Image: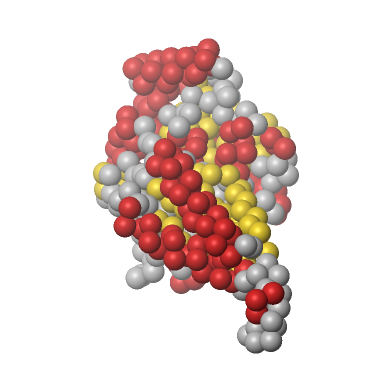
Amino acid sequence: MTITAARDHSRATLARRQDEVLGLSHALHADPELAYEEHRAARRITDLVERAGFDVTRGAYGLPTAFRATVGTGDLVVAICAEYDALPGIGHACGHNVNGSASVAAALALAPLADDLGLTVALLGTPAEESGGGKVDMLRAGAFDDVAAAMMVHAAPQDAVGLTTLAISSLSVAYSGVPAHAAAMPHRGVNAADAMMIAQVAIAAHRQQMVPGAVVSGVVTSAGDAANVIPDHATATYDVRAGTSEELAELQARVRACFEAGALATGADLLLETVGNDYADLRQDLAMGRSYQAAAEALGRTVLANGPGLRGGSTDMGNVSHVVPTIHPSIGYDCGDTIMHHPDFTRYGTTPAADRAVLDGGLAMAWTAIDLATDPAQRDRLLARHAARTARN
């Protein structure tokens, strides 16, 4: 089968299933679910692809809302990652209804072609991107062991390829002190709120020495209950971000030392825990990115190369990209003057432009997979990298 014939076949397949795919996107948008709790979303997707002939494993890799749906038996295994978790209070303000539905669109478009192209198409349901890092859990559990290439698209205000993101670690901070009357016997107290303040001042003082692009952000969630009582508890959540995983490790050590300084200075006890998985920086495969860009542009889209895209954000697809050749382009649609993770972004997720992003993103990924399967150099490169990784493990 020629590339042109394969592309035409995939476009026709997706056209026949367009209503199902867009119906899925709208249903996900109307029924947002949080990290690791996306039971209805996972069921909607798996029911759809199972009807289309995919072999489906629900609750895969020890995660109740993860799944693996495969079609084809080729030696080149391409994973298409579907995200479908939402944000607390603001729903799909990161466009995961678009992300997940575009991945389903790509898998459906490729399904009839998989065996002819020597492909195994693996649609992976990856929960908890917004908080926790389902892809990291799945990577650890072996979900990507047989995968030669991985891809997904992410909703954004514009199309771009070659993006990078920040590595991130999330921390839960809790100081425990000793309560006392703030006027009569303050000397008998241990002030947990002061411990938090000292840590925050230490972090602020360290900002000048942080590597460019590093970000430490946080919010105090409790710091006592009454002004006339020495606070015996103080809690906070913090995000630590850096340009690379290596830089993140160095910054984590310094930030931890700042929190320890608060405990040391006041005598409070400190409980400092990592929340969820650390996310690595995103390292995209340039050759795959060029294939995707050409496919998206052939569909009439304008794609920025190395665009700003998600540079200030973080994604657990970064961890996948450190192991498997990966692309994570953004798929753009008009969202006014809003940005992702803003409540106003949510309302643009089912517009005609967002629907077009679902279909174009899915078809561009399908055409990218066709390129990988039919270009001998690309195919051999990916299979050789997979064989080398398998040998190392």
Q: Which residue is drawn at the image coordinates 65% and 31% (left, top)?
A: 141
- Residue 229 vs residue 162: left or right? right
Where 68 sits versus 332, above or below?
A: above
Compared across the picture, whether 3 is left or right of 148 comes to left
Quarter holding the N terminus? top left
Residue 10 visible in rendering: no
Q: Residue at x 67, y 51 (%)?
A: 36
Residue 383 in percent (x, y) is at: 45, 17
Residue 393 image offset from top left, x and y in percent: 56, 17
Pick the front one: 99 or 212 = 212
Most foreground residue, 27 or 253: 253
For this rendering, which residue is in front, 215 or 173? 173
> Could you tell me which residue is drawn at 65 percent across and 79 percent down?
186
Seen in the picture, residue 77 relative to 130 is either above or below; the reply is: above
Instruction: Please tell me in which quadrant of the rendered image residue 226 appears.
Output: bottom right
Looking at the image, which residue is at 43% across and 43% down?
A: 250
